[in-house]
Amino acid sequence: MLDEALELLPRAALQRIVGRYISLDDVRVDPAASRRTLLEDARAFDAAARAGDYYQSFNVNSKTYMDKSGAVRAMCRSARRFSVW
């Protein structure tokens, strides 16, 4: 429901409501993109994660423990649709 409400609000109104918390570019759906439901997106994300699409091996030590691999960053970008942060 919220996903549909975001599409109905004019960009200026949405900017006033959420602009200081999140980037509007992260919540606006590309109109050219396929119109999958949130559940379909969640299932696709789950399937990709279980298939190892976001796995990347890297060494963890005192210098790299705070680093995020490219795969982790890609997973975070994909998961944004499911979060409010």
Image (cartoon, rainbow, N blue to C red):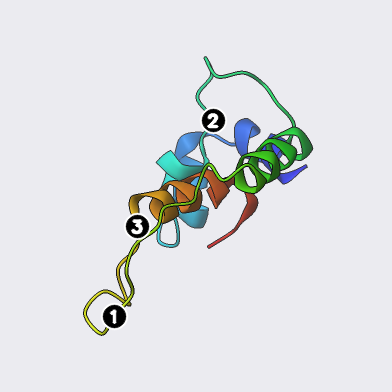
Say which residue appears at 53% left-offset and 41% top-offset: 53
Q: Residues within 10 Å of mark 2 (few under 14, many from 20)?
A: some
Say which residue appears at 32% left-offset and 77% top-offset: 65
**Amino acid marked by disc 1:** Asn
In this view, the mark in front (2 or 3): 3
**Amino acid marked by disc 2:** Val
Relative to 14, residue 28 above or below:
above
Q: Residues within 10 Å of mark 3 (few under 14, many from 20)?
A: some
Relative to 8, residue 1 above or below:
below
Report which residue position mark 2 lands on.
29
The percent coordinates of residue 6 (x first, y second) are 62, 39
The percent coordinates of residue 28 (x first, y second) are 51, 35
User: Looking at the image, which residue sits at the far bottom?
Assistant: 62
Report which residue position mark 3 lands on.
69
Residue 72 is marked as none
Residue 61 is marked as 1
Distance between mark 2 and mark 3 Cα atoms = 26 Å
Q: Is residue 69 left or right of residue 46?
A: left
Q: Residue 84 falls in which quadrant of the image?
A: bottom right
Q: Quadrant of the N terminus?
A: top right
The percent coordinates of residue 8 (x first, y second) are 64, 32
